[in-house]
Image (cartoon, grey):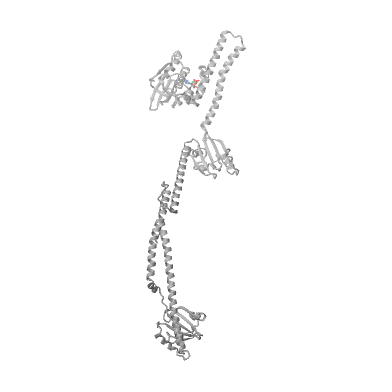
Amino acid sequence: MVKIKSFRGKIFLYFIVVFFLFTAAILTFQYQREKNYRAAQLENTLDNIAEITQRFTRQNNLIEENKLDRIGELKSIIPQPQTRITLIDKKGNVLYDSFVEEYHQMENHLDRPEIQKALRNQTGSNIRHSETTNQDYYYYAKKYPGYFVRTAVVYNVQIKNFLKAEQAFIFFIVSLFGVIGIILFLVTNRLSVSITKLKDFSIKAGRNERIERDTSFPENELGIIGSQIIRIYNNLKNTKDELSNEKEKLFNHLNALNEGIAFFSPQKEKTLSNSHFIQYINIISKRTIYSPANIFGIGEFQKLNQFLETHLSQKTPFHPEALPHLEYVISKNEKYYKIQSIVFLDRSFEVVITDITKLEKRRRMKQQLTSNIAHELKTPLASIKGYIETMLNNWPVPEEKQLNFLNKAFCQAERLTDLINDVSLLNNIEDAGELFPFKPVDIKKVIDDVEENFAHRLKEKHIQLLHNIQSGTVIQGNESLLFSVFQNLIENSINYGGKEITIEIKLYHEDEKYFFFSYSDNGEGIPAKHLPRIFERFYRVDHGRTRESGGTGLGLAIVKNAVQLHKGDISVRNKPRRGTEFLFSFSKK
Ligand code: ADP
């Protein structure tokens, strides 16, 4: 069977079936009426024949004289000569039958339905099949005093006759069926316009396409429903688009964050998370974790689990301004992670993991530094105090001794100033690099300035300074910091290199972004074991000697930080023969 898929086809089919049933019902009704009418006609004829037979029998005293065979004579009188006439007495015995010669031998007829009906109602009829003639008969019996007259004709009120008789009616009905069919076709067509549009709409909606508001919907209920659905759909689509835009932004933002962040439903199912989150929980956990929701099975997050267990099951509502909040630090493989969680009003919650290793290390370093500074300050202070105390305790002190003590105290005070200046410079470079204004700086000029500054001391120690830096070697940088870099390097060579040495500054390479410099001297050099730590604050090779030279142990730390602030890098190595070499770069812009 062909399956009708379209709505229009279906509606048309339903209508046509209903109309067909309706037509069939009318035809059946009409047929039944015709049948009844014909039966009534037939019954009327049979009644007349029964009456004639009765009258004939009575007038001619056929029963009394036992001449019932004469009834056969009636055949020539009545208009339906093929009518079967039977006379049956009250007990059901057949007295005469026009179709059966041996009617005396016929069985008792009292139980025949038409006779039974006639017994009760004077007349009775029945349609039955006759075995003798193998045809259907219409039997009609009428009760008279003393006997029944039964008349019968072959019953053939057939559909054939009916169709013949009612040709006009049938033709009318069939034409009507045709016309109504066409009308139904047109009506369903019209109805299906809205449906087809809705179908097209739903296909587009399924593909998530944008749908224009269609004004060509028919002006009926379906049309209105159609336009409304499209309007609602478009509103929803707009909202959905906006939401997904926002979500996209949020997602991009989350991914740009350094924190690992994840949002969970009250059932602890993940609703949103960024890539850092999964990365962090994998670092923290010993196992490989594929889903953010697995965080709840990791031992390291036990504290988080306990917190969530307490608050997610809490029945009393939270105060919007005092949402449950957890914060603790996990340390793993030299790294530190801050775990934070907030449970929201609807019991959904977020977990934020922040890598605080840098901050934590810096905090620890600062702590260390503070105690180092305190220690470094104590020494010159103690010296100054010592000189003053000696003078006070031994007063009056000879004049030349006084001068000597005051000079020494002054030197220590200078050292203190240097120290404080260096510490504050270092702090500034590290914490507030933006305080140093950047502008184009000519490196040659900086080196010349430093050389001039140290001219006396260089000459004193017979130190030669050579360099191949051309003027025009310009970088975007901070002049005073660049000055500090070369000043510290040259001062170290003067202080620790020894006499009659040569300092060489070379621009050994340059590319699009960087200048690469080498600074070397052929002095004492630094023992190899100290090289890895030489840039640390307060790190000195030889404490006694450095103090003597007035060094703070911060010079190279300042150099390194200043180089880094200029987006460069620095390393140190010993020269093959003698001396130390520093290799460093500065970004041009
Ligand atoms: P300071 O301010 O005490 O000079 P630095 O950080 O500048 O501290 O230097 C650290 C240590 O490195 C010094 O104590 C010194 O022993 C060694 N040093 C630095 N530069 C040189 C050099 N050119 N030759 C030999 N030793 C050096």
Rendered position, 310 above or below 12: above
In x, y percent, where is residue 496?
47, 18
Total number of numbered discs in the rendering:
0
Rendered position, 569 above or below 390: below
Residue 345 in view in this figure: yes
- For the C terminus, which image quadrant? top left
In x, y percent, where is residue 93?
49, 86
Quick one: 346 or 335, which is closer to the camera?
346
Rendered position, 368 above or below 224: above
Q: Quadrant of residue 462?
A: top left
In x, y percent, where is residue 410?
54, 14
- For the N terminus, which image quadrant? bottom left
Of all residues, the one furthest to the top in this rendering is 399
Of all residues, the one furthest to the right in this rendering is 393
Of all residues, the one furthest to the bottom in this rendering is 65
Residue 5 in view in this figure: no
Rendered position, 496 above or below 231: above
In x, y percent, where is residue 98?
43, 85
